[in-house]
Amino acid sequence: MKLWSGRFGKETDALVNAFNASIGFDQRLYREDIQGSIAHARMLAAREIISRRDAEEIESGLLEILQEIEAGKIEFTEDQEDIHMNIESILTARIGNAGKRLHTARSRNDQVALDFRMYVRREIKKVISEILNLEIILCEQAEKYQEAVMPGYTHLQRAQPVSFAQYILAYAHMFTRDVTRLEDCEKRLNECPLGSGALAGTTYPIDRWMTAKELNFDRPTGNSMDGVSDRDYAMELLSDLSILMAHLSRFAEEIILWCSWEFKFIELDDAYATGSSIMPQKKNPDVAELVRGKTGRVYGDLMGLFTVMKGIPLAYNKDMQEDKEPVFDALDTVEICLPVFAEMLKTMKAYPENMRRAAGRGFINATDCADYLAKKGMPFRDAYKITGELVAYCTGSNKTLEELKLDELRKFSDLFENDIYSALKLENCMALRNSYGGPSVQETARQIREVREFISARKI
Ligand code: ARG
């Protein structure tokens, strides 16, 4: 029998039952639902809306149900539609009238708003700790390769010398922002909607501050209609997760490039690569490719939820039941991508000698050559032009800048002296890029220190 059957003269059609039910996916809110109900019951008793005895029976009944759910002993039914009604009806079947009093001064609308918020809040913490774990690994890898000169690219064309550490730390900075974005989302969502009722609050003398405090919220939500209708936190979470996935997919793309024969800057561990069913030589970066691919899923979840929420009038509408699956899917996706990606990076091997070889071709010290002339007094634009002509000359004779003899160089400018060779040496070019945030060892050491401080200021 439905909890709400009183008003109806017919049973719900079986098709509608199946269509309407959300228990198939919202059962993962069981913990939050029970926590929220216990806080609600305690408050009702404290405000003498129900008796202490009833509240105690409700609490012990719910705790028992919680244990049984975790032990896999409870079967939910579609007939009870969702997790909220399933739990309430199990409770009532066990404790009778006290169970029937639990829903006093409450609606499923504020109940689901509460459960979902608490769920998102809990998962944000989990995602943050996974990102921090990834950042720890990035710091360890960066520390090993501070001296490893590699080409930095723009337009995927070799541009200027950086170190492998600098490259890795660029991603660490992105992930740091992802953490702060999620923390920000958590701060904003931390208001308790319980007590908003169906949409218009309640005539009972409830204490919303008490339930908010009990459930670790900063305060109750300030408007009952907004309280039950707001899903900003879910949209914000999906935005944050989408940006995080954008970062992971860019990194994944680099990994895929780097382990190709065209680059061979890295080698993935055998445990983090896969083979081909026909080509015996293949070692494929499936993990990175899947992370790149799953980014599309998370963007889809984001667009799905945005589209569900678009144009819904206040307050609760059943459309909003569609808010959960995209959030669950995005969280599941991110929570699997992060640890597997982290381990893949932890176990990968870098080939600094291949990076160095690649850095040697492509004139990535051309800017340094122009800077050399500029530092000797030539206006930078002139120095730039002369260096361009030198590059063209080298391309014609298949040489690098540093392979040119001093008298060849001096045909282009008499400012060239013997010290040009040390100015063109890639190791020096990198080491001298010591401006704040640059790739010099001193600067990558500072970056590693700062990322580590960021991590240790948070508990994992
Ligand atoms: N299963 C519903 C959801 O997830 C719970 C809220 C239902 N409220 C209602 N008035 N039908 O949105």
Image (cartoon, grey):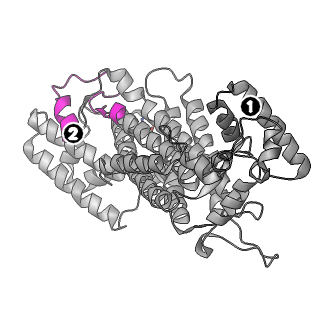
Q: Looking at the image, in which quadrant does ligand 1 appear?
A: top left
Which segment did they paint magenta?
187-216
Q: Is mark 2 within 8 Å of ligand 1?
A: no
Q: Is residue 207 highlighted in magenta? A: yes
Sort mark 2 into few (<14), some (14-19) or many (20+) by Cα contacts within 10 Å.
many
Tell me how far mark 1 sits from mark 2, CA to CA.
72 Å
Q: Nearer the viewer, residue 20 or 71?
A: 71
Q: Nearer the viewer, residue 3 or 368?
A: 368
Foreground mark, 1 or 2, reads 1
Disc 2 on helix, strand or loop? Answer: helix
Q: Position of residue 196 (x, y in %)?
A: 30, 27
Q: Is residue 405 visible?
A: yes
Residue occupied by mark 1: 384
The amino acid type, in three-letter code, at marker 1 is Tyr
Q: Dividing the picture into quarters, in which one does residue 268 lie? A: bottom right
Left or right, 82 with respect to 207, comes to right
Q: Dividing the picture into quarters, in which one does residue 337 lie? A: bottom right
The amino acid type, in three-letter code, at marker 2 is His
Q: Position of residue 273 (x, y in %)?
A: 65, 70
Q: Position of residue 104 (x, y in %)?
A: 23, 35
Left or right, 239 with respect to 194, comes to right
Q: Is residue 17 visible?
A: no
Q: Is residue 428 above or below residue 197?
A: below
Residue occupying the point 28% across, 58% down: 66
Q: Nearer the viewer, residue 239 or 354?
A: 354
**Residue 40: which disc?**
2
